Image (cartoon, rainbow, N blue to C red):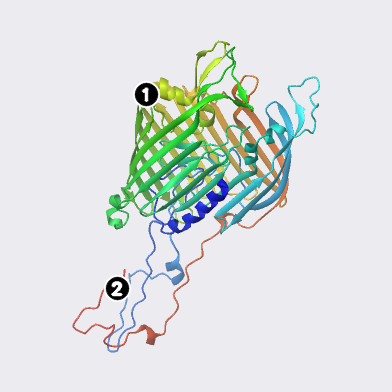
């Protein structure tokens, strides 16, 4: 019933989104936003026919030649905005076109090797603006690496842990996407992409997929027009434990472009909630951490945040878009933080648009507040954010994120965040980000590369490193690192080879904690791809104006011709 209600609500947003303007907040979500062009092309007006007794006008020799109808009607390239890396935050590639196929390959999961068989369907509708992906992954055990005496004892056994709860059936839905981030209506439901709300002060690149043994289907809906809009997000449509939202107004959105800072002034309110945030991990009488259904057991309570945002544009041309912004976010029961930032977007080229995106932030942070609280690592850190000594069993005393930030604190500090991206829409995307604070040498780093342009091969790779103190340890493969990489090769029209590497987290039942683990999948797929990808759907060119007979185009005397002693009205602009 929740899914039905969600569908009805999304359909109702269509009318709201028709009056499209520009959203208050430009965000970093896992799908690229393509906005309307900032400037249109003026059509050349043909010269009027000379009246009887008048000499025909002769153009100066150095006058520019008027463009042909086809050239005049050609629209300028749309200004590229939004995230330039589609797969940043994803754990695998998604196909570009319609696809029906079955894949089979080797999957190392934990300490065992499996044969992974997965029937998959991907469909595109509405000029490829709507995409749906469904799959049924089945792992059949081949070798148990921990069982040295008889490693093939469970040969052919279906891994029951993948399907032992209602929640596990969320892994069937890969994605449902409509539009791009920063379109007037954007919908993202699934496991594939990360989510950012607003400028990211509360939610920045939240990833539903870093716990590989616990699939989450997150959902996001954005809608706006020239006077306001909203963003809504939940981390898991089957649990709804995390809810986030942004509502904004543009009180002067009706004024002209000549008052740009006033017209683009946006004022917003954000709120976030984890209603079942762990407050302390459960242990037995001996101090050993406990598990429930293979998950870490914890006492829980609500963690809430509220924020206020404002932004405006100071430059908007065909090639440059610059907006400063300010956010203040407060952790309920804790303290707050102020972010002063600027987002710059730059487009170079016409036939091929090279897009650049730069974000710079200065942060003034209270001790009991964490910026971008719901981030890429959140689903792990909500259980084990920091270690504080050892418990009675001699085990690490792991403190959940909410408890540590709100009750212990991180110290008053000043922070920074810098991000730079380059991309050619649907061809290549590169992103780097770095953040840190003044009272701790630890820094966070993100790097990403994707090349989805070729039909016979597609590749991507994402790298995250948390809490490193020197760049010499940046690529050390420790528990502070997450990495995803994938490739798809088509040697034959019906044959595909897919590869995926990952270094991420899963609960280790032996140590009763999240362990950072390496894994890979290689499979061969037999299938059929058809139809067009979104980047291959071209907008229809505007039809040239129909020719009108001169007798109909020329107004009768007294209706359209000014008296001889009055100047003719200026031509329409």
Residue 312 image offset from top left, x and y in percent: 32, 46
In this view, 177 is above or below 543: above
Taking the view exactly as shown, the residue that stands out farthest to the front is 1
Q: Does residue 29 lie above or below 553 as drawn?
A: above
User: Up-down: is 263 above or below 332?
Assistant: below
Could you classify mark 1 by the number of other residues whose Cα lies within 10 Å: few (under 14), some (14-19), or many (20 or more)?
Answer: some
- Which structural element holds mark 1? loop
Indicate whether 469 appears above or below 60. Answer: above
Camera-side residue of 404 and 283: 283
Question: Percent x, y for residue 563?
Answer: 22, 84
- Between residue 544 and residue 480, name the one nearer to us: 480
Say which residue label 1 marks.
367
Residue 165 seen = yes
Q: Which mark is residue 571?
A: 2
Give the structural element (helix, strand or loop) at label 2. loop
Could you tell whether 282 is left or right of 247 in the image? right
- Residue at the spot x=54%, y=55% of the render? 129
Q: Where is residue 441 in the image (x, y as percent from the top left)?
A: 42, 21
Q: Of label 2 and label 1, which has the lower sequence position?
A: 1
Question: How many numbered marks have been drawn onto this rendered protein structure?
Answer: 2
């Amino acid at each position: 019933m929740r899914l039905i209600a969600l569908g009805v609500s999304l359909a109702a947003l269509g009318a709201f989104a028709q009056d499209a303007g520009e959203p208050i907040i430009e965000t970093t979500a896992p799908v690229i936003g393509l906005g309307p062009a900032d400037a249109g092309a003026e059509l050349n007006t043909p010269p009027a026919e000379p009246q009887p007794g008048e000499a025909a006008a002769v153009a100066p020799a150095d006058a520019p030649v008027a463009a042909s109808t086809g050239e005049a009607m050609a629209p300028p390239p749309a200004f590229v905005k939004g995230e330039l890396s589609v797969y940043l935050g994803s754990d695998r590639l998604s196909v570009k076109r319609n696809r029906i196929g079955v894949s089979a390959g080797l999957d190392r999961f934990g300490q065992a090797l499996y044969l992974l068989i997965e029937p998959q369907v991907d469909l595109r509708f509405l000029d490829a603006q709507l995409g749906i992906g469904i799959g049924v992954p089945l792992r059949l055990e081949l070798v148990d690496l921990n069982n040295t005496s008889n490693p093939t004892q469970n040969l052919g056994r279906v891994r029951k842990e993948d399907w032992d709860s209602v929640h596990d059936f969320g892994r069937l839905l890969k994605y449902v996407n409509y539009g791009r981030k920063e379109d007037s209506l954007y919908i993202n439901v699934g496991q594939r992409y990360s989510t950012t709300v607003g400028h990211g002060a509360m939610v920045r690149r939240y990833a539903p997929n870093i716990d590989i043994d616990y699939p989450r289907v997150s959902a996001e809906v954005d809608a706006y027009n020239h006077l306001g809009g909203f963003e809504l997000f939940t981390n898991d449509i089957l649990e709804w434990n995390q809810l986030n939202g942004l509502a904004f107004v543009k009180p002067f959105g009706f004024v002209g472009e000549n008052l740009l800072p006033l017209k683009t002034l946006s004022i917003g309110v954000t709120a976030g909630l984890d209603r079942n945030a762990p407050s302390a991990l459960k242990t037995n009488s001996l101090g050993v951490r406990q598990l429930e259904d293979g998950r870490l057991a914890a006492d829980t309570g609500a963690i809430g945040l509220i924020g206020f945002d404002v932004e405006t544009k100071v430059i908007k041309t065909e090639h440059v878009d610059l907006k400063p912004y300010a956010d203040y976010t407060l952790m309920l029961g804790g303290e707050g933080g102020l972010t002063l930032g600027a987002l710059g977007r730059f487009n170079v080229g016409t036939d091929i648009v090279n897009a650049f995106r730069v974000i710079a932030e200065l942060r003034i942070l209270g001790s009991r507040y964490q910026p971008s609280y719901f981030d890429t690592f959140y689903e792990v850190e909500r259980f084990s954010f920091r270690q504080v000594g050892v418990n009675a069993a001699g085990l690490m005393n792991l403190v959940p994120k909410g408890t540590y930030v709100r009750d212990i604190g991180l110290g008053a500090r000043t922070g920074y965040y810098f991000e730079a991206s380059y991309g050619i829409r649907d061809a290549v995307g590169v992103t780097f980000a770095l953040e840190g604070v003044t009272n701790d040498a630890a820094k966070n780093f993100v790097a990403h590369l994707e090349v989805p342009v070729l039909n016979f091969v597609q590749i991507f790779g994402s790298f995250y490193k948390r809490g490193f103190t020197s760049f010499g340890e940046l690529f050390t493969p420790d528990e502070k690192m997450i990495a995803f990489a994938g490739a798809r090769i088509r040697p034959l029209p019906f044959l595909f080879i897919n590869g995926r590497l990952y270094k991420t987290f899963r609960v280790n039942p032996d140590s009763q904690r999240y362990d950072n683990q390496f894994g890979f999948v290689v499979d061969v797929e037999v299938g059929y791809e058809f139809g067009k990808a979104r980047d291959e759907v071209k907008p229809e060119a505007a039809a040239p104006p129909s020719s009108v007979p001169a007798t109909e185009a020329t107004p009768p005397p007294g209706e359209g011709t000014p008296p001889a002693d009055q100047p003719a009205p200026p031509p329409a602009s």
